[in-house]
Image (spheres, helix red, strand yellow):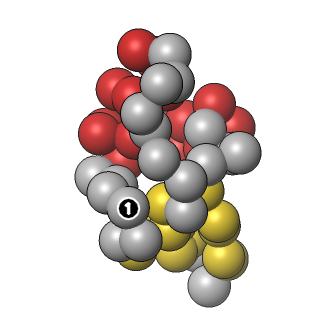
Amino acid sequence: MATLSITQLKSGIDRSENQKRTLKALGLRMHKTVELNDTPQLRGMIAKVSHLVKVVEK
């Protein structure tokens, strides 16, 4: 299964509560990178916070 490297580049401060919860559910913090399996559910979460993160397919 493919994996995605997700890095948070922008702050979650002053964002909607849904976006804050999504960042927390992804396990992200500022400039921290996590590697997760590529699933449709994960893609949906990334779409919600796409303006705050950088995604690299591996």
Of residues 17 and 3, which is closer to you in this image? 17
| Residue 39 in view here | no
Q: Left or right: 27 with respect to 58?
A: left
Q: Secondary structure at mark 1?
A: loop
Question: Going by the picture, which residue comes out furthest to the front?
Answer: 14
Q: Quadrant of residue 22?
A: top left
The residue drawn where x is 50% and y is 68% is 7
Q: Where in the figure is residue 50, as x and y percent of width and height?
A: 69, 45
Q: Where in the figure is residue 47, as x and y percent of width and height?
A: 69, 37
Q: Quadrant of residue 44?
A: top right
Q: Where in the figure is residue 46, as x and y percent of width and height?
A: 60, 44
Of residues 31 and 6, which is closer to you in this image? 31
Q: Circle 1 sits on which residue?
A: 30
Residue type, numbered disc 1: Met
Q: Left or right: 42 with respect to 40?
A: left
Of residues 46 and 7, which is closer to you in this image? 7
Q: Where in the figure is residue 8, as x and y percent of width and height?
A: 49, 60
How many labels were placed on the picture?
1
The residue drawn where x is 36% and y is 47% is 26
Q: Quadrant of residue 38?
A: bottom right
| Residue 50 in view here | yes
In the displayed structure, would residue 30 be above or below residue 49?
Answer: below
Question: Going by the picture, which residue comes out furthest to the bottom?
Answer: 58
Q: Looking at the rendering, in which quadrant would you find the C terminus?
A: bottom right
In the displayed structure, would residue 20 be above or below residue 30?
Answer: above
Within 10 angstroms of label 1, few (less than 14), some, or many (20 or more) residues? some
Q: Left or right: 22 with respect to 6?
A: left
